[in-house]
């Protein structure tokens, strides 16, 4: 168990693991609560209970007799999505096993808070699974393990995983100075990946795993490409990089506000683990930059219309990645948003109203006319395209409709044309499942009020893939193909386009 954590436990875990497994778990196995989880639950029960014990000790320095419902909820809803790497079968049984386990401890009065913890876990079961499926929350290490496993690499073989990372880096940084590529690989493999699952990373609030990765890599790549040896970084250099470069980098205000806490945590980790000679000194200097983010940089890179929409969403507490809430809010409040845009009087904004998603033509697209042109695909690309679309067509015609089939063909064609070496790596079934899920996410396929309707579980069951890998592949596909705007005619069904809240405001 110790091997899955990137640094030492704050206290010796052995006595606490012994209490849980030798006493609580052994008695649990003789109970009716244990029988209620079934044979499949029995297979993973010990691992599930051991994981909880380890996570509570490592991330919260909390011994079993100190567990409370709030601490357990935080662990399951925050630490598990970020850092727990287990197969889908294990993840499915986590709330089932833990609810029964704590019910047993409460009934037998072996642990005073057990009954309240059991009730809390039972209530949050659906939310827990939603969090575990959210790939934006994954740490870099967890994402790497999932991607490597998809390519047939045993995640337990860490040397092979690092080899996979090296190969991926070589492809991503093709054309870069080999010395830069090597330094970035060393930086990521020895510093960033372990940090992404560390207690220091876990202590950063209101950020996603993607935020952590993005900010640290932007900082590191700027310095390494400038010839600065990571081992020689010092407080002055980092302060100048943050105030002169990072604070002016094109990203949203909220993400900019995370620069200082993320990099402070990163260098604190390097200092604690003695990975950098000036890690703690750099961390202390970065801490002093709190409150020094210039106000004038706020959303400077965004179009005026986009900024007004974002301000509405932020005011309502709606996160941009919460697709359902964004769609509902835009549908219900578009007139108010449009009025704010017109009231601003900003010339650039008024010009912007005549283009983009507000001014685009969305009617009469006719999905039959969208069949992709594959005539310029190379033989290898065409072979891959045919293999993938055979699978997406089969699923679409069996469970969706011909319109979904054509949109999936469009996505597969765009991926095939990329020809950067990544597309034809990995299992075709995962690519096919990822394409269907990506298209489905743009058209609310998992919303039972929409027709057709399919859950992610249905897609994964058909293609024989697991949810974590499929969700991660779907996100990659959306990013690579630019599939990010709802009501984009290229990726939307006719029904979805008919719901476009911007449609009635077209100026052309």
Image (cartoon, grey):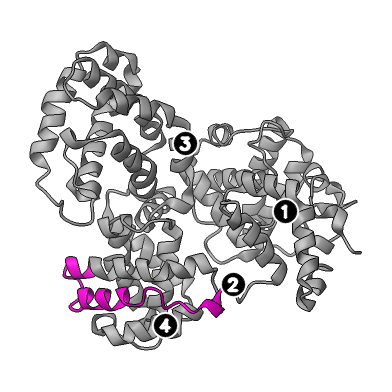
For disc 4, the neighbor class at 10 Å (few under 14, some 14 to 19, many from 20) is some
| Residue at mark 3 to residue at mark 4: CA–CA distance | 38 Å
Residue in the foreground of this view, choosing between 285 and 459: 285
Q: Which callout, 1 or 4, points to the residue nearer the camera?
A: 4
| Residue at mark 3 to residue at mark 1: CA–CA distance | 33 Å
Q: Tell me which corner region of the image, top left, top right, bottom left or bottom right, holds residue 40.
A: top left
Query: Which residues fall within the magenta stretch?
Result: 270-298
Residue 59 in percent (x, y) is at 25, 49
Q: Residue at x 26, y 73 (%)?
A: 283
Residue in the foreground of this view, choosing between 121 and 476: 121
Q: Magenta stretch: residue 288 in it?
A: yes
Mark 1 or mark 2: name the one nearer the start of the chain: 2
| Residue at mark 1 to residue at mark 4: CA–CA distance | 43 Å
Left or right of residue 120, residue 296 in this image: right
Residue 299, label in figure: 2
Q: Which residue matches tag 3?
A: 127
Left or right of residue 9, residue 223 in this image: right
Q: Secondary structure at mark 2?
A: loop
In which quadrant is the N terminus drawn?
A: top left
């Amino acid at each position: 168990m110790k091997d899955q954590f990137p640094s030492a436990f704050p206290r010796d875990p052995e006595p606490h693991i012994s209490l849980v497994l030798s006493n609580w778990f052994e008695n649990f196995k003789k109970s009716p609560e244990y029988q209620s989880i079934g044979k499949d639950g029995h297979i993973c029960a010990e691992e599930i209970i051991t994981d909880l014990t380890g996570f509570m000790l490592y991330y919260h320095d909390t011994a079993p007799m100190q567990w409370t419902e709030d601490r357990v909820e935080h662990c399951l809803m925050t630490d598990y999505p970020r850092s727990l790497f287990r197969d889908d079968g294990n993840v499915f049984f986590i709330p089932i096993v833990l609810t029964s386990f704590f019910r047993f401890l409460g009934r037998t009065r072996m642990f005073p808070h057990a009954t309240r913890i059991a009730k809390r876990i039972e209530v949050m079961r659906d939310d827990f699974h939603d969090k575990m499926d959210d790939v934006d929350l994954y740490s870099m290490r967890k994402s790497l393990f999932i991607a490597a496993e998809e390519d047939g690499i045993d995640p337990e073989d860490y040397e092979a995983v690092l080899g996979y990372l090296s190969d991926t880096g070589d492809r991503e940084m093709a054309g870069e100075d080999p010395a830069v590529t090597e330094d970035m690989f060393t930086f990521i493999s020895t510093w960033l990946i372990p940090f992404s699952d560390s207690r220091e990373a876990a202590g950063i609030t209101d950020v996603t795993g993607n935020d952590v990765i993005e900010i640290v890599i932007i900082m590191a790549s700027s310095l390494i490409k400038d010839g600065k040896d990571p081992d020689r970084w010092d407080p002055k250099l980092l302060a100048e990089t943050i105030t002169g470069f990072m604070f002016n980098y094109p990203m949203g205000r909220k993400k900019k506000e995370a620069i200082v806490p993320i990099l402070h945590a990163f260098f604190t980790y390097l200092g604690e683990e003695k990975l950098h000679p000036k890690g703690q000194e750099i961390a202390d200097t970065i801490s002093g930059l709190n409150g020094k983010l210039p106000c004038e940089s706020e959303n400077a890179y965004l179009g005026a219309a986009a900024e007004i929409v974002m301000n509405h969403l932020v005011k309502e507490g709606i996160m941009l990645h919460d697709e359902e809430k964004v769609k509902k809010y835009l549908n219900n409040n578009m007139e108010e948003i449009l009025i704010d845009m017109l009231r601003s009087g900003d010339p650039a904004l008024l010009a912007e109203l005549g283009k983009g998603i507000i001014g685009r033509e969305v009617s009469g697209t006719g999905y039959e006319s969208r069949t992709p042109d594959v005539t310029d695909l190379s033989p290898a690309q065409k072979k891959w395209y045919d293999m993938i679309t055979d699978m997406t067509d089969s699923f679409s015609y069996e469970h969706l409709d011909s319109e979904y089939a054509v949109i999936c063909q469009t996505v597969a064609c765009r991926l095939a044309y990329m020809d950067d070496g990544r597309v034809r790596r990995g299992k075709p079934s995962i690519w096919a499942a990822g394409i269907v899920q990506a298209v489905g996410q743009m058209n609310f396929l998992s919303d039972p009020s929409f027709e057709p309707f399919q859950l992610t579980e249905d897609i994964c069951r058909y293609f024989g893939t697991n949810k974590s890998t499929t969700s991660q592949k779907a996100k990659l596909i959306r990013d690579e193909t630019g599939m990010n705007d709802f009501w984009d005619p290229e990726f939307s069904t006719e029904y979805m386009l008919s719901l476009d809240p911007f449609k009635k405001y077209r100026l052309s």
